[in-house]
Image (cartoon, rainbow, N blue to C red):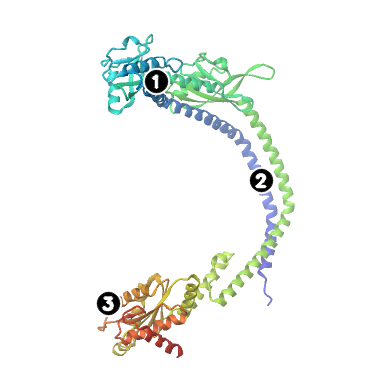
Amino acid sequence: MKKKRLTLLVLLSSLSLAAITLFVSSMLWINSIYQKYQQDLISVQQQQIDNAKQELQNRVDTISGWINYRSASVEQTLKDNLANRVFELNLLMEDIYQKNRTTLSEQQIKQRIVDTVRSLRYNQGRGYYFIDTLEGDVILYPIFPESEGKNLINLQDDQGNYSLRDEINMVKNHGEGFTEGYWIKPGNDRTKYKKIAYVKKFAHFNWYIGTGEYVDVMEQQTQQEIIHYINHLLYGDGDKQYVFIHNEQGVELANGQYPAMVGRNNYNLTDDNGVKILQAQIEIAQSPPGHGFLTHLWPSVDDNQTITQHEKLTYVRGLPQWGWVIGSGVDMTELKRSIAQNQRDLYEQFYASIIDVISLALGIFVLSALFANYMTNHIRNGIEFFTQHLQSSSAQLSGIDLEDVEYKEFDMLAAVFNKKTKKINRLLNIDPLTEIYNRRFLDQLLEQEWQTSQQQGTSIAVVLLDIDHFKQFNDRYGHQIGDDVLKQVSQAIYHHVGGQGYVGRYGGEEILVILPHHTAQQAYQLAESIRQKIAQLRLDNIEQTITVSGGVSDDNHSACRLIGQADDYLYRAKKLGRNQIIYTDSPNSDSKTDSVSYLLSSKS
């Protein structure tokens, strides 16, 4: 019977499937394109409105976040400015003192400092410096010189705080720092304004110096900087989009597009639909969550200079700390024009997609045939590659790396092969009784490790152990017990050595331990600990103590000489009474005797 070819079956099946699905897939494709076109027509308007809303919200929220930061940092900015001013003044006074301390009297130096500081001004002449003593005497107060020379230790602000006492305590306790007071400004209402001062002790006299400023003045300065920035801020094509700020009373504070509106109260501004625009914006800003969208009419000028009202989408957010409302909007006329253009683009894309489907349908079968042929060849190559791996691994008794198997379907075959190979290797390399390495595999390992030590210049040692009086166990308890003794001793040695080396049955009741990177001294210590562990080993139904003798070798002239020397020392350990370990530096070793023993054993 003629065998079928798997690759030919794959090729014919692929071509048949391509032919059957050609018509169905084309129709489904066209239908899905049409359905998507219908959905896009419906969603494009909402999507663009959502995009416009997101852009407006991002714009306003970004600026309001910056304003909130500036608002929250007013006091800190003021404090930094005051501290810097006082530090500069202290340096100036220190310079005057150092330049004149050897030529002028203390009183003359003080007067020169006072005369110099009296004329110093900052912030357009509003800022000044003062000097007081630590007892409350006024040395310098430029805006009220009548108080100079007087003691104002009991001076209180408009909330009853002792201003000079607070300043003196700060200087005495900390050397410098900030104080706060509340004062009613002259010619103003009865509002108590917060004023921050920074004071610092002057090292050479019983003085402290300082300066102060009202927080609301710094706040007003910050507001003016923000308003100036907003008045010059424009967005979009032709800079038609802008940001505005008005207060909760309807007064326009900043407007990047309509500067004429700034300063006017537009609280009652109403569009043609009766919407009171600013009142609606203020209501949104004052109601949770404090921000939102508003659609209203807004006047615009067309190309013929005709003023018409158009629909506008506006987003506003409240700034309650200052009683402001910030917002930005977009012309819905432009947005609707953009939506209509996008809908026309969608139709053109739909029409082009239908043409593409019809054109592609004519070439699908050819492309499918080429792809099927390519895949068939690829599968054939994969089968041949797997077969070569199988043959190579079988010859070397090595497993197949599943990462090299290209097709998942071959994983099971590779796994079965690896399992069988592992079982064969176990039978070849593991002693069935003791379940440790056998002599054949030990010889291979020893040769490999010896070669590595030669190449890398590292040490290597071996330990050859033998169970003392093993024949007595067989004669007294039977071979079954003797085998059990051999197995238990082998496993005890195996677990004791762990990852330090390799353990295997070298012959009869002899156990060989290969120890890479070990000197004879290190190997001896390990062997001695093994000997002591075995001496403590107790087995059921066995009264006789189990002991081992051993020889340690680090003669790395060859792998054979390692074994030979270890065997010599093992023989000597037996000869000297058993239950001991011997190596070159041990008390019972005899290098001359050992050399002769090795020569005899090598000749035999």
Measured Cα–Cα span from mark 1 to mark 2: 69 Å
Q: Answer above or below: position of 118 versus 530.
A: above
Q: Which residue is mark 1?
A: 215
The disc labelled 2 sits on which kind of residue?
Asn
State the SS at label 3: loop
Residue under pointer 3:
536
Question: Which is more toward the observer, 277 or 251?
Answer: 251
Counting from the top left corner in percent of width and height, residue 316 is at 50, 25
Q: Are marks 2 and 3 in contact (CB under 8 Å)?
A: no
**What amino acid does circle 1 point to?**
Val
Amino acid carrying mark 3 in the image: Gln
Q: Is the C terminus in the top left, top right, bottom left or bottom right quadrant?
A: bottom left
Q: Which residue is mark 2?
A: 31
Total labels: the figure holds: 3
- Marks 1 and 3, how far apart in space? 87 Å
Q: Position of residue 338 (x, y in %)?
A: 64, 30
Task: Assign a secondary structure to mark 1.
Answer: helix
The one of 104 and 386 positioned closer to us in this rendering? 104
Residue 86 image offset from top left, x and y in percent? 38, 23
Instruction: Locate residue 288: give its quadrant.
Output: top left
Mark before the other along the chain sequence, 1 or 2? 2
Q: Residue at x 49, y 70 (%)?
A: 456
Residue drawn 39% across the image and 84% down it: 567
Badge 1 local density, few (<14 within 10 Å), some, or many (20+)? some
| Eye-nearest disc, 2 or 3 | 3
| N-term mark: 1 or 3 | 1
